[in-house]
């Protein structure tokens, strides 16, 4: 009988610890989702002025069940990301990735042609957004578009000269 009581007491403790850990996991996830959602909306509206974006659980479900991406233009919310252009979908994806990176920031990021599907105005918005939201991070960005270069503190241009690669370093004095 004594062993049974010990086992039952240990089981009760384990159940209690598991419940506490589940609650802590839930609170951590809710906090993370709230922060990522705020940053996602802020970044997206910087990249695409006049537009809004948010993360929300499907109707009748919670954050623990998953999230949907909602995008609106002039207060009209789209039913599906399929209604967006390729450039708009690129901005949604970039905004979400960067919002998650803001939650757990790193000192250095490398982005390779994230502006490939975008026109010049949106490319310039990416550079401006990075300056606003990532003040304490450094970026190495590969881009073929001049709009991205306008916000760079230091620019390395590569080109092909007489059969060899040449690199030119330019410091932007306006920064």
Image (cartoon, helix red, strand yellow):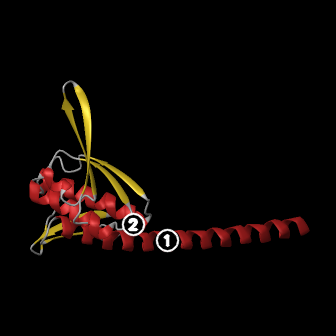
Q: Is residue 1 visible?
A: no
Question: In which quadrant will I find the C terminus?
Answer: bottom left
- What is the C-alpha distance between the residues marked 2 and 1? 24 Å
> Does residue 102 sit above or below 117 in this rendering?
below
Instruction: Measuring from the top left, give residue 16's x and y in whole percent.
Output: 67, 73
Characterize the local packing of mark 1: few (<14), some (14-19) or many (20 or more) Cα atoms within 10 angstroms. Answer: few
The image quadrant where one finds the N terminus is bottom right
Q: Nearer the viewer, mark 2 or mark 1?
A: 2
Residue that numbered label 1 is attached to: 28
Q: Residue at x 9, y 73 (%)?
A: 74
Q: Is residue 89 left or right of residue 131?
A: left
Image side of residue 36 versus residue 47, left or right: right
Is there a contact, CB below 8 Å, between mark 2 and mark 1? no
Indicate which disc residue 131 carries. none
SS for callout 1: helix
- Residue 148, compared with residue 31, is above or below; it is above
Image point (37%, 58%), residue name: 138
Side (left or right) of 110 relative to 19: left
x and y percent of residue 44 in the render? Answer: 22, 66
Q: Nearer the viewer, residue 36 or 46?
A: 46
Residue 78: horizontal and vertical position, in percent? 14, 65
Q: Which residue is mark 2?
A: 136
């Amino acid at each position: 009988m004594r062993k049974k009581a010990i086992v039952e007491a240990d089981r009760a403790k384990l159940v209690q610890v598991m419940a506490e850990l589940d609650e802590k996991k839930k609170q951590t996830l809710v906090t993370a989702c709230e922060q990522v959602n705020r940053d996602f909306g802020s970044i997206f509206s910087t990249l695409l002025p006049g537009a809004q974006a948010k993360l929300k659980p499907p109707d009748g479900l919670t954050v623990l069940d998953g999230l949907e991406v909602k995008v609106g233009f002039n207060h009209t919310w789209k039913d599906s990301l399929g209604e967006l252009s390729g450039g708009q979908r690129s901005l949604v994806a970039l905004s979400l990735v960067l919002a998650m990176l803001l939650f757990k920031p790193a000192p250095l990021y490398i982005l390779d042609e994230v502006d490939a599907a975008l026109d010049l105005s949106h490319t310039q918005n990416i550079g401006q957004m990075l300056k606003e939201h990532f003040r304490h991070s450094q970026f190495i960005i590969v881009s073929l578009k001049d709009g991205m270069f306008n916000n760079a503190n230091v620019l390395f241009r590569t080109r092909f000269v007489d059969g060899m690669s040449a690199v030119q370093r330019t410091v932007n004095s306006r920064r």
